[in-house]
C-alpha cells in the first residue's frame, strides 16, 4: 500500500514538474514605434481560483503545491487542467483531467473537458 501511494506521488510530481512555467511572460508583444525604438509590453493572464482573481502563474503554483500535498484531490486536478489549458499545454491538460477522472470517476465536467481537449488536439 505504501509503495502504491509513493508511486502515485512520484507520478503526480512528474506531471507537476513538467508543467512548471513562467506564465507571466505569456502574451508578450513588441510594439515598434515610428522612430524604430522598441517597447516591450508584457501582458499577464489572470485566473479565478476559489473566488479570487489572481495571476495565472500564482494559480498554477498554488495548485501545484496543493497537489504535491494531496495528489488524490480530483477537484484540484480538474482546476489544474483548466488553468494549464490556458497556456496551450495539451499533454499536461490531458494528464490533469485523466487524474481528476481517476479520483472521481463520475465527474462529468472532467470527462467533458477531457473529450474537448482530446478532440481539439488530434
Image (cartoon, rainbow, N blue to C red):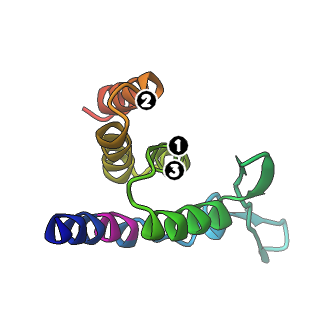
Answer with mark 2 or mark 1, whichever residue precedes in sequence. Answer: 1
Task: Give the labeled residue for mark 3.
Answer: 76
Taking the spot 31% from the left edge, 35% from the top edge, the residue there is 121
In-front residue for pair 41/94: 94
Which quarter of the figure is the C terminus placed in?
A: top left
Specify whether 70 is left or right of 39.
left
Front tag of 3 and 1: 3
Res 43 quadrant in image: bottom right
Mark 1 neighbour density, 10 Å: few (under 14) some (14–19) many (20 or more):
some
Taking the spot 44% from the left edge, 45% from the top edge, the residue there is 74
Q: Main secondary structure of the magenta part?
A: helix
Res 57 quadrant in image: bottom right
Front tag of 2 and 3: 3
- Report how far apart the C-alphas of labels 3 and 1 lie in the structure: 10 Å
- Residue 64 drawn at (x, y percent): 50, 66
- Residue 8 drawn at (x, y percent): 25, 63
First to last magenta residue range: 12-16
Mark 2 neighbour density, 10 Å: few (under 14) some (14–19) many (20 or more):
some
Disc number placed over residue 82 in the picture, else none? 1
- Report how far apart the C-alphas of labels 2 and 1 lie in the structure: 8 Å
Answer with mark 2 or mark 3, whichever residue precedes in sequence. Answer: 3
- Identity of the residue furthest to the bottom in this view: 37
Specify whether 75 is left or right of 24.
left
Disc number placed over residue 113 in the picture, else none? 2
Amino acid at each position: 500500500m505504501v509503495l502504491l501511494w509513493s508511486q502515485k506521488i512520484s507520478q503526480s510530481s512528474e506531471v507537476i514538474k513538467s508543467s512548471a512555467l513562467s506564465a507571466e511572460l505569456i502574451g508578450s508583444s513588441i510594439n515598434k514605434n515610428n522612430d524604430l525604438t522598441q517597447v516591450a509590453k508584457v501582458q499577464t493572464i489572470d485566473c479565478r481560483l476559489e473566488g479570487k482573481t489572481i495571476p495565472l502563474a500564482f494559480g498554477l503554483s498554488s495548485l501545484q503545491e496543493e497537489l504535491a500535498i494531496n495528489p488524490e484531490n480530483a477537484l484540484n486536478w480538474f482546476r489544474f487542467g483548466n488553468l494549464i489549458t490556458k497556456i496551450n499545454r495539451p499533454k499536461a491538460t490531458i494528464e490533469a483531467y485523466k487524474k481528476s477522472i481517476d479520483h472521481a470517476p463520475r465527474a462529468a465536467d472532467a470527462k467533458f473537458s477531457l473529450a474537448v481537449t482530446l478532440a481539439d488536439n488530434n
